[in-house]
């Protein structure tokens, strides 16, 4: 006998023999989006039976185009995700799963974040290049630009990866404090990783970095709100909280110095 099991998250459907389903099984993992869902299986009398999904049925959340690139193609998956995050973040993040794993978002964030960071550094280097050479001619005389950029290309992905984990950890802690982190650290990390799409704006000389930084904040506010199904107030409070804490700590250090000096 055969049953047809449909994932409630991405609507992927697959027929399987009842002989391959252990007795008492109530959970399945989608091979496409990797979501785990409950289903109500009863041994059919004959033919093909449609197995209704349980928990999560009717959910509109699923994998991002990047995570479905085996189906869509690498370039289409990359482009659709990048375009969606950049121009319609609310729509993308409101339909994106919050627990599909961090490996794919990490790969996406590393790719877009590293590319943007390298271009951002390149434009900034052009601005301050003459000043640096005039101040430290002996230092820059020992290295050619090719070697400098090779070192940057090696170190940039490491820095981008580290920053994604650090920012995600701080943001999620602040979301927990404000009561807005209902869908876990992975949900926060996915927003931080996919929001690296905005870093591609740094390809635009000189002004791209500022525009990208500003839009990056907006995309993260929208994304965190949608992925954790919380309010904009809680999300904005969580993003402001680290700045407030840093200001308080700075004042706690600086004020005593002025008093005693």
Image (cartoon, rainbow, N blue to C red):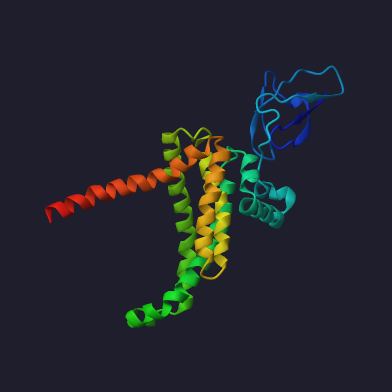
Q: Residue at x 63, y 40 (%)?
A: 94
Q: Quadrant of residue 258?
A: bottom left
Q: Is residue 114 above or below residue 26?
A: below
Q: Residue at x 47, y 37 (%)?
A: 234
In this rendering, would 46 be left or right of 198? right
Residue 67 in view of the camera: yes
Q: Quadrant of residue 27?
A: top right
Q: Residue 149 appears at what percent x and percent y?
A: 48, 72
In this rendering, would 17 be left or right of 192? right
Q: Nearer the viewer, residue 162 or 175?
A: 175
Q: Nearer the viewer, residue 175 or 232?
A: 232
Q: Residue 88 appears at what percent x and percent y?
A: 64, 49
In this rendering, would 12 be left or right of 121? right
Furthest residue in direction left, as rendered: 260
Quadrant of image for the C terminus: bottom left
Q: Quadrant of residue 139?
A: bottom left
Q: Residue at x 74, y 27 (%)?
A: 20
Q: Residue 75 appears at what percent x and percent y?
A: 69, 57
Q: Is residue 153 above or below residue 38?
A: below
Quadrant of image for the N terminus: top right
Label tally = 0
Q: Residue 207 appears at what percent x and percent y?
A: 52, 67
Q: Is residue 65 above or below residue 98?
A: below
Residue 136 in view of the camera: no
Q: Is residue 150 above or below residue 105?
A: below
Q: Nearer the viewer, residue 261 or 60?
A: 261
């Amino acid at each position: 006998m055969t049953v047809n099991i449909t994932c409630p998250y991405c609507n992927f459907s697959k027929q399987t023999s009842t002989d391959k389903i252990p007795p008492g099984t109530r959970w399945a993992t989608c091979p496409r989006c990797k979501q785990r869902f409950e289903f109500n299986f009863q041994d059919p009398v004959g033919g093909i039976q449609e197995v209704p999904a349980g928990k999560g049925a009717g959910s509109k959340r699923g994998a991002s185009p990047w995570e479905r690139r085996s189906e869509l193609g690498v370039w289409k998956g990359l482009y659709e995700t990048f375009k969606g995050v950049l121009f319609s973040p609310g729509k993308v993040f409101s339909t994106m799963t919050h627990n599909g794993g961090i490996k794919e978002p990490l790969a996406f964030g590393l790719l877009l974040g590293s590319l943007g960071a390298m271009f951002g550094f390149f434009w900034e280097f052009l601005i301050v290049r003459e000043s640096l050479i005039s101040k430290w001619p002996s230092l820059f005389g020992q290295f050619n630009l090719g070697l400098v950029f090779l070192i940057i290309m090696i170190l940039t992905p490491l820095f981008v990866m580290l920053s994604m984990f650090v920012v995600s950890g701080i943001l999620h802690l602040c979301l927990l404090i404000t009561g807005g982190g209902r869908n876990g650290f992975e949900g926060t990390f996915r927003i931080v990783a996919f929001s690296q799409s905005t870093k591609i704006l740094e390809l635009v000389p000189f002004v791209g970095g500022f525009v990208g930084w500003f839009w990056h904040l907006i995309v993260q506010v929208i994304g965190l709100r949608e992925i954790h199904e919380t309010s904009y107030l809680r999300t904005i409070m969580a993003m402001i909280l680290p700045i407030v804490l840093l200001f308080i700590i700075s004042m706690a250090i600086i004020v005593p110095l002025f008093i005693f000096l």
